[in-house]
Image (cartoon, grey):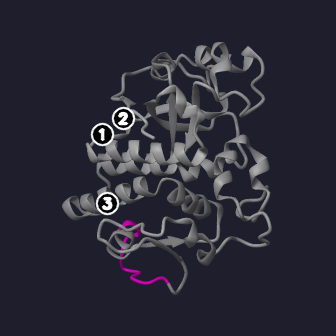
Amino acid sequence: MKPDLWNPAFESLHPCFRQLRNRDGWSNLENWPDCEYLNPLLPADLCAQSGLPVHFVPQDHTLPFPELYYEERIFQHGMVATRPNWHDFFNALMWSLFPQTKVMINALHAADIVRYGKPRTPQRDALTVLDESGVIIVASHLEHLQQVVDFAWETLFWQERAAWGREIDCFMIGHATLEKMLTPYVGVTAHALLVQVEPDFFLRSLEQQHAYLDQVVVNLLQEGGLSSTASLNPFPLLGVPRWWANETVDFYQNKDYFRAKNRERMVRILTSIMSD
């Protein structure tokens, strides 16, 4: 598929796009969804921490406040500059699925800019990696998340293959990674937050799962739990069963992709109880 050529059937290109199905509505669109289409996907009362409503605006010659940095414009005016391309389309969908997380990411960026200026701090680096390349690995059994921490990829993806989708799963949150999954390749790697959930998480609707994870990530960010990129765990996306031609154990023995752990990180396994 050519870059930035609209394809309303993009969901058929990879299983990860099934996570977007509760936002579907573009199958009949001949051109890029514009801001008028995207804005109703947001919660009606969603505001930046400055109190102004969040909304998408075209990133063209009409873009207001051109002197402001992207994050400053969102924080000060609620305006998310959006272009007609895959990167910004997926960003808009992530705003709709993880709205409170996006607001918190923006607020932390804005606070760091005020305090330290525009050069990126370690926290802003971590926020950007989560925002662009993040995934959330959820599991009802602690040992599965520990296998991620330990880089025990063959155990996690092959020996525990039957657990995927029932006891463990991978939720996309980074919009740049979603863009990569339009044309995936061996080597594509995300950066993961790890969340232990109750077993009934996997019985909930997709909307309920997203809402729950949105709040979990917000709580982490509020606590200052993403102070550097060392708080995120590398995760080889194509190891997820059925996310690639990975039906034999040989695939997981490619050590250039499924690398051994070479250093300790500050990765936490988050736990929270899902309420009705």
Residue at horizontal 33%, vertical 29%? 266
Callout 1 crowding tier (Cα within 10 Å): few <14, some 14–19, many ≥20: some
Marks 3 and 1, how far apart in space? Answer: 15 Å
Q: Which region of the structure is painted magenta?
A: 63-71
Q: CA distance from mark 2 to mark 3?
A: 19 Å
Residue with the most extreme front position: 276
Q: Quadrant of residue 28?
A: bottom right
Q: Which residue is mark 3?
A: 107
Residue 254 in sight from this viewpoint: no
Q: Is residue 255 visible?
A: yes
The disc labelled 1 sits on which kind of residue? Gly
Q: Camera-side residue: 80 or 199?
A: 199
Q: Evaluate if marks 1 and 2 touch, with contact meaning CB atoms under 8 Å apart.
A: yes
Percent of width and height locating residue 204: 57, 39
Type of residue at label 3?
Ala
Per the image, label 2 sits on a secondary structure element best described as helix
Q: Disc 1 marks which residue? A: 225
Position of the N terminus by quadrant? bottom right
Which element type, helix, strand or loop, lies under badge 3?
helix
Give the residue at mark 2.
231
User: What separation in Å lies between label 1 and label 2 (alpha carbons)?
Assistant: 8 Å
**Foreground mark, 1 or 2?**
1
| Residue 175 as seen in the image, left or right of residue 6 | left
